[in-house]
């Protein structure tokens, strides 16, 4: 069974930093691309970032480009999101998701339960 | 940036068929994926590549795409189908992922 467990969320002041982690199990982590998706309170889903199996390809939403850094450790089956220069509008539940490729398209076929990040003074 | 437009809400009578639409410019050139999110829970993939169902999703769920509109259809709607539904596409040229704004499905 695929399991994705996020951690590292919490309360941080504007301008501060936070590092999210996602522990993966139940599948060959190094064979899959991975993504982060967030959801502000009462709002819809917003894609944040994705990276390929060996981290060769990395993509960011414009809203986080230059502030967030996605990375992975295949030896530890872990995904990370380093978030710097945080703003109030970054407040959201952050989901880790497996980013699956199928016939030339990508979708998110497994999701963690999410970790809440609150940016407030 | 690319945009996907969904109705804010859709209502369906118990046992009837619900349709959730997703509009986007030239959406016919992209594959569309659909997710269901119940309150307080993580999203779940219900349709991928326009009309493919993950094995755990019942046959009542189907997808289609025509012109600038993709549609998620839920047959024989049940109370347990009440949720927010999101469409999603991936842009091959930029690597960007776009979600629709989400549709709240209510079963009456």
Image (cartoon, coloured by chain):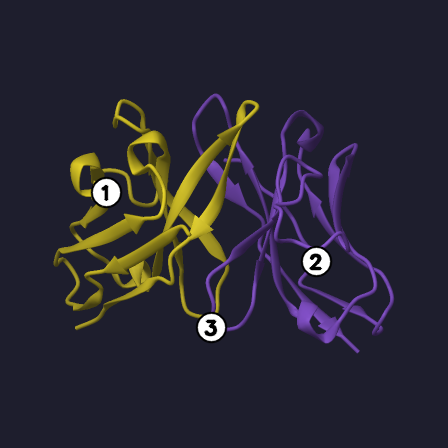
- Front in this rendered view, residue A68 or A97: A97
Q: Is mark 2 on a helix, strand or loop?
A: loop
Horizontal and vertical percent position of residue A116: 30, 67
Q: Calculate the distance from the C-alpha at mark 2 to the C-alpha at mark 1.
A: 38 Å
Horizontal and vertical percent position of residue B101: 57, 55
Q: Residue at x 44, y 33 (%)?
A: B96
Q: Taking B82 as reference, is A36 left or right?
A: left
The answer for which chain carries disc 2 is: B
- Label 3 Cα neighbours within 10 Å, binned few <14 / some 14-19 / many ≥20: few
Marks 3 and 1 close (CB-CB < 8 Å): no
Tell me the mark number nearer the camera, choosing from 3 and 2.
Answer: 3
Q: Which residue is drawn at 57% across and 23% down?
A: A103
- Label 1 Cα neighbours within 10 Å, binned few <14 / some 14-19 / many ≥20: some
Q: Which of marks 3 and 2 is nearer the N terminus?
A: 2
Q: What element carries label 1?
A: loop
What label sits on residue B60 in the rendered view? none
What label sits on residue B40 in the rendered view? 3
| Label 2 sits on residue | B7
The answer for which chain carries disc 3 is: B
Tell me the mark number nearer the camera, choosing from 2 and 1.
Answer: 1
| Label 1 sits on residue | A77
Kindly give the residue lying farthest to the bottom in the view shown.
B108
Horizontal and vertical percent position of residue B33: 61, 42
User: Quadrant of the image for the C terminus of chain B?
Assistant: bottom right
Kindly give the residue lying farthest to the left in the view shown.
A16
* Residue A60 is at least partly visible in this image: no
- The quarter of the picture where residue B9 lies is bottom right
Tell me the mark number nearer the camera, choosing from 3 and 1.
Answer: 1
Horizontal and vertical percent position of residue A121: 16, 73
Q: The yellow chain is which one?
A: A
- Front in this rendered view, residue A28 or A45: A28
Chain B: its colour in the image is purple
């Amino acid at each position: 069974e695929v399991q994705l467990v996020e951690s590292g969320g919490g309360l941080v002041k504007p301008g501060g930093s936070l590092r999210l982690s996602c522990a993966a199990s139940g599948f060959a982590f190094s064979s899959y691309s991975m993504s982060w998706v967030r959801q502000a309170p009462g709002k819809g889903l917003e894609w944040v970032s994705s990276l390929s199996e060996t981290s060769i390809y990395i993509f960011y939403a414009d809203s986080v480009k230059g502030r967030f850094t996605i990375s992975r450790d295949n030896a530890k089956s872990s995904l990370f999101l380093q978030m710097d220069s945080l703003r109030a509008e970054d407040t959201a539940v952050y989901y880790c998701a497996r980013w699956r490729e199928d016939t030339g398209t990508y979708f998110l076929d497994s999701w963690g339960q999410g970790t809440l990040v609150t940016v407030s003074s | 940036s690319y945009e996907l437009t969904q109705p804010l809400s859709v209502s369906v009578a118990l046992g009837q068929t619900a349709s959730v639409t997703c509009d986007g410019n030239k959406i016919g050139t992209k594959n569309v994926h659909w997710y269901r999110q119940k309150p307080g829970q993580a999203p779940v993939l219900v349709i991928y590549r326009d009309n493919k169902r993950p094995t755990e999703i019942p046959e009542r769920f189907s997808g289609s795409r025509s012109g600038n509109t993709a549609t998620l259809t839920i047959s024989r709607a049940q109370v347990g189908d009440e949720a927010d539904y999101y469409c999603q596409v991936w842009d091959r040229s930029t690597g960007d992922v776009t979600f629709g704004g989400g549709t709240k499905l209510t079963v009456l």
